[in-house]
Structure formats: C-alpha cells, structure tokens
Image (cartoon, rainbow, N blue to C red):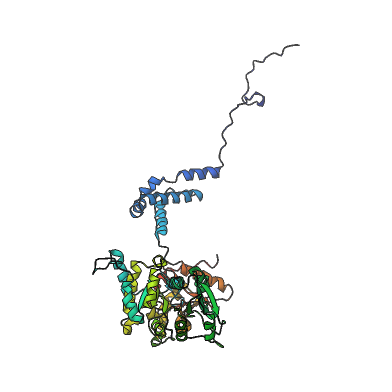
C-alpha cells in the first residue's frame, strides 16, 4: 500500500472541507422583539428607587414602610407581567399610593338610598338619630359604668340602663335587651319551651329575610312546634284543643311582612291571653318591627304598638330596635317581672347581650320618645316616613338639570311620581306617595343593557347611588335624600361607558 503524501498547502478559512469543528455551541441570539422587551424590563426602577421619590416617601408616611414596599412590589410585578418599559420611579410610587388607598377604603361604605324603601335591610335599616350618635361616640371614647353600680360601688346590670325607659314607654313590669329580635324570640322559647311544646297558628309561621323561618328558630330553641288551625283561619278551639301537660307556651306572631285577606279568622291577642292564663302557660307576642307610637298620627296605617300588646295581656312581648323604633339593631323582651327574671338567668342571655355602644344609642333613642310632639324632627326614620310629597317633588326639580346635563342626551331624564314603602317587614301593604327622577334610554332596543350599565356606573361612584329599575326606567326615589349637595357632587363624577364599545 502506497502512502498518501501530506500536502503542505495552507488550510483555507473559506473551504468547507477545511473547517474546524468546535465542541462549543455559539449562544443563541434573542429575537429582536424579545431582546427589546428584556431591555425595557431591565429599565424598571428598583423598589428603593421608587421609595425615594416624592410619592414613595408619601406612601411610607401615610401607610408605613412595610405596606408601601408591598404596594411598590405589586406595581412593579404588574408592569413586568404587562411587559411595560417605564423607568419613571415616581409613577410607580403614584401607582403604589393608589393601590394602598383602595385597600384602605372601608368595605362598609355610605350610599345614597334612592330605592324608595326607607327601612332597607340590605342598606342598614334605620338611620341613627344625632343624639344616639353622640351618645355612642362618648361611650366609645371613655370608660363607662356599664355593669357598675355607682351608688353602692358594687356590680351592676347592663339592663338597668334601659329597664326604666322601656317600662315607662310600654307599661310593662320589666324588660331586657339582646342583639336582635330573632335572638329575643330564641331566648324566650328556649327559656320556657325547651323540651316542651310551643303552640302557634299555622298562618303565623312566617319566614323573614334570608330564608330564616320561625319553625327553624323553634327547633334551635329546643321547642317542639305544634301548629294549629289552617293558613287562613284559626279558631279559639284550635288552641284549647292543642294545649296539654307538655305545652310550654303559646306564641302569637304578628305577620308584619305580609297580609292574608279574604276568608280569614284569627284569635286576638286578648283572647289568647285569657286562654294562656286558664292553662297556666305564658303567652309570647312577637311584634317583629314593633313601634312605640301610633303611626296614624303621621298619616300611616295603624301598626300595633308595644304598649297595646302589653295592655292586651301578653306575658312577654318581643320586638326590634332597628325598624320602626328607629334605633340600632337590638331585640327587646318586655313583660312580667318573674318571666324576665327567668330569661336573665338563662345562660344564653350572656351570649346574646349587647355592648356599651349599642346600649348608649338605645338609651338616647328611647329618650326621644318622651317628647312625641318633636319626635318626627329628631328621629330620622320617622322624619323620612312622614316627609310630604310636595317637598320631595321640589327636590326632584332642583336635581333634574344637573343629572340631565351629566348624562349628555344619552338618556331621557324627567321628574316622576312614584311610591315608597316602609320596608323590613313593616306595614307591607302600606305605600307612601313620593317622587323622583326617572331615567330612560332614548331607544327601546338595547335599553335594558343601557340601564344596567348606568345602574352599575352609579354604584361605582365614590358615594354609590342605589335606585331601582322598573318599567324600563331607572327610578331614583328621593324620599330618603337629605343631602342634595352630596348627590350633585356624585352626579358630577358619573363616568359612562362608550356606547360604541
């Protein structure tokens, strides 16, 4: 075999046959767009750079360093996710402050209640009188003699702050208070009918908001429900036939949130009191949204008062504090002294009691009833319920130009007649003549979506405006409006979506 001579010709750098194969792979170059994005992201300021700007310093001063750092990091993370390229540190400080302000805003926000329902459960029911607000503020800011007897220097009872007032206003022998009326009924049932029977008319087995039913309360109280009569008619013999050695009490429930009309019959509270006494069991009359004053003097229908229920012979009467009474949420039990004493010995009473702030508000509210001639001026609930239609119409005409101008021709706005209601299960058949602003889309097609968008825009205002949609119009019932200037300021902030979007 002949050997092949080795050429001494230099290796060409261009010839493919003469390339040297390298084991190291050349780095991959990023695509131009990706490279630009990475370069932009590297321009984002650091957290410390943001905190050293004016907005960053302000964020630390207002919300603390820890919260400010977290907000800045969140703003930078959002910029990275959106592949933003801003290097303006002050801008990120501003974004951080906006985030912190949104987080610090209270969840329980004031709103303009323009629904036409005065005691709107979802909007907090009764507004609190100024006297009650002042009393609550004083109780919050300093120590109070909540359960301390200043005369003896010994332990006192928190019910003492309200007992005298409640007895004075209702004619009852004694009284106690818990955190709402459902709790009042629960406590009374548990005290006198636990392991026993509670007799009630079938037509009074009510359901209140949130699918909360009277039979469920009885079951939780440990009482066995005994229904008598039919839905529309209950007779005296129905009760007497159901009473026996296992009976713990008779319960009468005022059907405050509905009415049964037509072929009906019920046994009056006075008759039931006689039946209960004859069988040695207590009669509990649950008035629900009980009132302390006759509402007919203010142009409304008659609602049984607590004093009337006591005078009719009920052994115990239960009612709410934040409905027609016009105070904070509470439940009252008034009646026979011996029965109230048994209720107060029930261990459940401590679990259902109210705090010093609510006691202060309740005391101040109840004292307003000592001057019934000026009650409508001082108690917001009664003031709104008794407000005349002429006054409401005048308010609507004053507000109309500003709202029409803000909506810019995209909706028709006009003053309208409407009817308000009391709400919270009080006088369900009673309506109050009122007036408001009716907003309608210019065209029927797509009108529902336009009204829904407008309603959403009103709810998004700094102080949300809550109305009601009916008959293809958004109606703002002005019965509950007492701050026209505030509503005008809210109107100025309305931001409507682009109709072309």
Quadrant for the C terminus in the image: bottom right
Quadrant for the N terminus in the image: top right
Q: Front-most of 227 and 397?
A: 227
Q: Front-most of 378 and 414?
A: 378
Q: Return the residue found at the far top.
A: 2
Q: Front-most of 279 and 192?
A: 279
From where the camera sits, is residue 458 visible?
yes
At x 56%, y 76%, the residue is 443
Q: Position of residue 48 (x, y in %)?
A: 38, 45
Q: Position of residue 134 (x, y in %)?
A: 30, 71
Please indicate whether residue 83 sits to the left or right of residue 126 in the image: right
Specify the quadrant of the image occupied by residue 103: bottom left
Q: Position of residue 113 (x, y in %)?
A: 43, 74
Q: Position of residue 183 (x, y in %)?
A: 44, 70
From where the camera sits, is residue 235 visible?
no
Q: Front-most of 76 and 88?
A: 76
Specify the quadrant of the image occupied by residue 308: bottom left
Residue 374, placed above or below residue 486: below
């Amino acid at each position: 075999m002949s050997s092949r001579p080795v050429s001494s010709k230099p290796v060409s750098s261009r010839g493919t046959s003469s390339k040297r194969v390298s084991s190291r792979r050349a780095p991959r170059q990023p695509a131009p767009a990706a490279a630009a994005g990475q370069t932009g992201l590297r321009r984002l300021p650091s957290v410390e750079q943001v905190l050293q700007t004016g907005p960053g310093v302000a964020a630390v001063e207002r919300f603390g360093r820890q919260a400010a750092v977290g907000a800045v990091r969140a703003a930078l993370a959002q910029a990275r996710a959106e592949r933003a390229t801003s290097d303006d540190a002050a801008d990120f400080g501003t974004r951080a402050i906006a985030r912190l302000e949104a987080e610090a805003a209270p969840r329980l926000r004031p709103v303009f209640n323009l629904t036409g329902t005065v005691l709107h459960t979802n909007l907090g029911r009764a507004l609190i009188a100024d006297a009650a607000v002042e009393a609550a503020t004083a109780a919050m800011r300093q120590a109070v003699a909540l359960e301390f007897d200043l005369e003896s220097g010994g332990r006192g009872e928190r019910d003492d702050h309200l007992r005298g007032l409640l007895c004075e206003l209702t004619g009852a022998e004694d009284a106690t208070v818990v955190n709402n009326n459902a709790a009042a009924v629960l406590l009374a049932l548990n005290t006198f009918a636990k392991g026993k029977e509670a007799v009630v008319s079938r037509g009074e087995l009510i359901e209140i908001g949130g699918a909360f039913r009277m039979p469920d309360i009885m079951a939780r109280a440990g009482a066995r429900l005994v229904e008598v009569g039919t839905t529309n008619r209950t007779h005296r013999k129905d009760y007497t036939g159901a009473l026996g050695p296992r009976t713990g009490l008779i319960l009468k429930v005022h059907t405050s949130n509905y009415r049964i009309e037509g072929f009906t019959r019920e046994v009056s509270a006075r008759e039931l009191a006689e039946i209960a006494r004859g069988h040695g069991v207590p009669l509990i009359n649950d008035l629900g949204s009980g009132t302390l004053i006759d509402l007919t003097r203010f142009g409304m229908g008659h609602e049984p008062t607590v004093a009337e229920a006591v005078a009719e012979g009920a052994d115990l009467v239960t009612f709410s504090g934040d409905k027609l009474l016009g105070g904070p949420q509470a439940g009252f039990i008034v009646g026979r002294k011996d029965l109230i004493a048994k209720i107060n010995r029930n261990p459940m009473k401590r679990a259902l009691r109210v705090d010093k702030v609510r006691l202060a508000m309740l005391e101040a509210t109840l004292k307003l009833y000592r001057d019934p001639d000026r009650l409508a001026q001082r108690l917001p609930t009664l003031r709104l319920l008794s407000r005349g239609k002429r006054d409401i119409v005048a308010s609507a005409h004053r507000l109309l130009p500003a709202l029409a101008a803000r909506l810019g021709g995209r909706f028709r706005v006009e003053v309208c007649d409407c009817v308000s209601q009391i709400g919270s299960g009080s006088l369900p058949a009673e309506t109050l003549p009122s007036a408001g602003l009716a907003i309608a889309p210019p065209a029927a097609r797509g009108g529902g979506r336009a009204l829904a968008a407008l309603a959403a825009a009103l709810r998004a205002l700094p102080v949300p405006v809550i109305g009601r949609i009916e008959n293809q119009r958004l109606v703002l019932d002005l019965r509950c409006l007492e701050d026209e200037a505030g509503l005008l300021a809210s109107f100025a902030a309305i931001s409507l979506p682009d109709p072309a979007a």
